[in-house]
Image: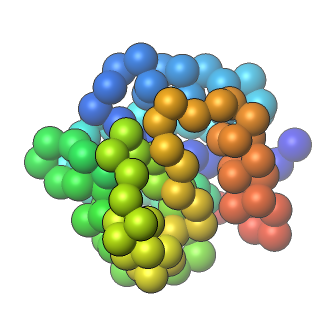
Amino acid sequence: MENYRILVVDDEKVIREFLRDFLSDQGYETDLATDGKEALDKIKRSNYDLVITDIKMPNADGIEVLKKVKRKNSNTEVIIITGYPSLDTEAECKNFGAAGYIVKPFQINQIKLLVGRALKSKKPV
């Protein structure tokens, strides 16, 4: 399997670690960030194939992360996860280029499907 790099951003430790463990088991190189600011710092220093980010977080929200990711590299895919879904927010995320929008609590098969779709035609960074 090609070694795709994924950044998981969530202020909930259990979600971060669950996604890291699952994605690592799938063969992906996975990095973690505890909030939007840490994510933005990591995005400045490294390239990722995919960023999976929560929306509501301290220091910078997921929409800000999405915008900065797409400004740095429009080929980096972003999947948004949220415990506070709304049609307006989903539309805003898609307008800024999100590859997916998923509501917590989610099923792991939903993540697997969205990650597979997002990385399907990409070459690893």
Q: Position of residue 120 (x, y in %)?
A: 81, 62
Residue 61 vs residue 8, the one in the foreground: 61
Decide if residue 123 is in sight here.
Answer: no
Q: Position of residue 103 (x, y in %)?
A: 49, 44
Q: Residue at x 23, y 54 (%)?
A: 61
Q: Residue at x 59, y 75 (%)?
A: 75
Q: Position of residue 35 (x, y in %)?
A: 24, 40
> Is residue 29 rendered to the left or right of residue 72?
right
Give the mark count.
0
Q: In which image quadrant can residue 54 be found?
A: top left
Kindly give the residue lying farthest to the left in the view shown: 59
> Is residue 106 rendered to the left or right of residue 113?
left
| Image: 20 above or below 67 | above
Decide if residue 117 is in sight here.
Answer: yes
Q: Residue at x 12, y 48 (%)?
A: 59
Q: Residue at x 41, y 17 (%)?
A: 14
Q: Quadrant of the N terminus?
A: top right
Q: Quadrant of the C terminus?
A: bottom right
> Is residue 51 rendered to the left or right of residue 13?
right
